[in-house]
Amino acid sequence: MKNILSVSVMLVVGSTFAQPQISDVSLSQDPATRRVTVEYSLTDGPAVVTAEFTTNGVALPGHLYTTLSGDVNIIVTNREGACSFVWNPDNDFQAALGPDAEFGVRLTPWDVNDPPPYLVVDLCATNTFFFYASTNDIPDGIQHRRYKTDLLVMRKIPACNRRFHASSLNGEKGSRNSDFGHVDAEVPHDITLTNDFYMAIYEMTQKQFGRIYGSWSSQFSEADDSDIRPVEKITYNVIRGSTGDGFNWPSTGDAVASESVVGILRKRSGINTFDLPTEAEWEFACRAGTDTSLNSGKNLDYSNVWGKNGPEACPALSEVAWWTGNSDGATHPVGLKRPNAFGLYDMHGNVLEHCLDWYETGTTYSDASHIVAPKGPVSSSHSKRVLRGGSYANYAPACRSASRVGWPFWDEKQVGFRLKCLPYFAR
């Protein structure tokens, strides 16, 4: 068997202000096993190092790199001459690569405080998480079942110093200023966020929840594909803690109960910034640059939303959401509807999603002024926390980007959540 190997390597800096540097790169292939080994030196680290392989000068699809192991797609510390990783191309590509395949590799060092756009956390292991430059680089693709059961996929949301319009626009169908009034729950105002953050691309599923917290009696746990349907009947107390610091955010800061979902995940993953999103973060992530009632860039399209139940009542919503018009009265597996521009699924419908903030309305919620990184009121006259996004049992107006309700909610089987964390991994 003839073996041709290229050791030409392209080096790229992943961030405009990243300091880490890679040098002394070598690429070799075992003629017997055809396994490819890449060795390199890292200085001015730590860094997240990602790789892109080429064969005969053509880039190979990153989602097919299922056998990479070693110092790649993880945080790598300063180790001159001691960094390496292995790849088995025959296992990943099988007959797709001939014996004369000529390999090259491109390595990218990313600053650990400006890591790659995608973070994948292993819920079945401790201190195990990986970074990827795009969804095309995630092994087997994000729709693989394991990313809805054993792993948590998160997308970095570019929110730092971004100003956006929160809540409904004047005259928005289904809003406080339209014929179908949500009175004063939605007060239009501008918000500027001060940090990027990672947001889970899927709502927390029943299997993922079980991996973190243990078994849970969801309403739809006996349904087909229950493992990959969103977990529901979830309370704020279970997510953060029923008493003390976990329940009293924002007055007690980011502390949570150690036995809560977030507390367990922080300890197991080693990522101590896991939490619920603030209401402002949730809406920014949902809208993904849109100012329409839906994050697809469309508005609600109905003639009589309260009198119609079928999908024909609001086809624009049915494109992106499971709601009362198309859900058949139940949740559905996550990730089946069209994602928004950030690649987040089910931000509309399926289950209502918890946010950190206390729930208020009217001027207590906002006096319509511009706010920087809001955390919401320090308490609630309603004794409620914020829920966003609508559910499988809601009509169209309740599933808009701007719609707000409070938890405790009258029907807890409509209530679930998704998590966020911050993109700072300096060690």
Image: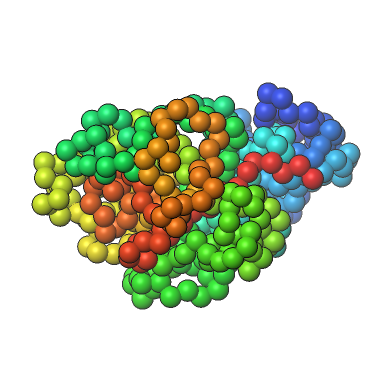
Q: Is residue 276 left or right of residue 347?
A: right
Determine which quarter of the picture holds residue 125. bottom right
Q: Is residue 386 above or below residue 416?
A: above
Residue lying at the far right of the rendered structure: 80
Q: Position of residue 69 (x, y in %)?
A: 71, 53
Determine which quarter of the picture holds residue 411. bottom left
Residue lying at the far top of the rendered structure: 16
Residue occupying the point 85% across, 40% down: 78
Q: Is residue 151 above or below residue 367?
A: below
Q: Is residue 420 left or right of residue 170?
A: right
Q: Position of residue 352 (x, y in %)?
A: 38, 55
- Total numbered labels: 0
Q: Is residue 16 visible?
A: yes
Q: How is the image coloured?
A: rainbow
318 or 366: nearer the viewer = 366
Residue lying at the far front of the rendered structure: 381
Q: Is residue 346 above or below residue 104?
A: below
Q: Is residue 96 left or right of residue 324?
A: right
Q: Is residue 333 left or right of residue 284?
A: left
Q: Is residue 72 visible?
A: no
275 or 367: nearer the viewer = 367
Q: Quadrant of the C terminus?
A: top right
82 or 17: nearer the viewer = 17
Residue occupying the point 53% across, 66% down: 238
Q: Is residue 45 above or below residue 97?
A: above
Residue occupying the point 24% across, 64% down: 329
Q: Position of residue 117 (x, y in %)?
A: 58, 38
Q: Position of residue 392 (x, y in %)?
A: 29, 57
200 or 412: nearer the viewer = 412
Residue occupying the point 46% across, 37% down: 284
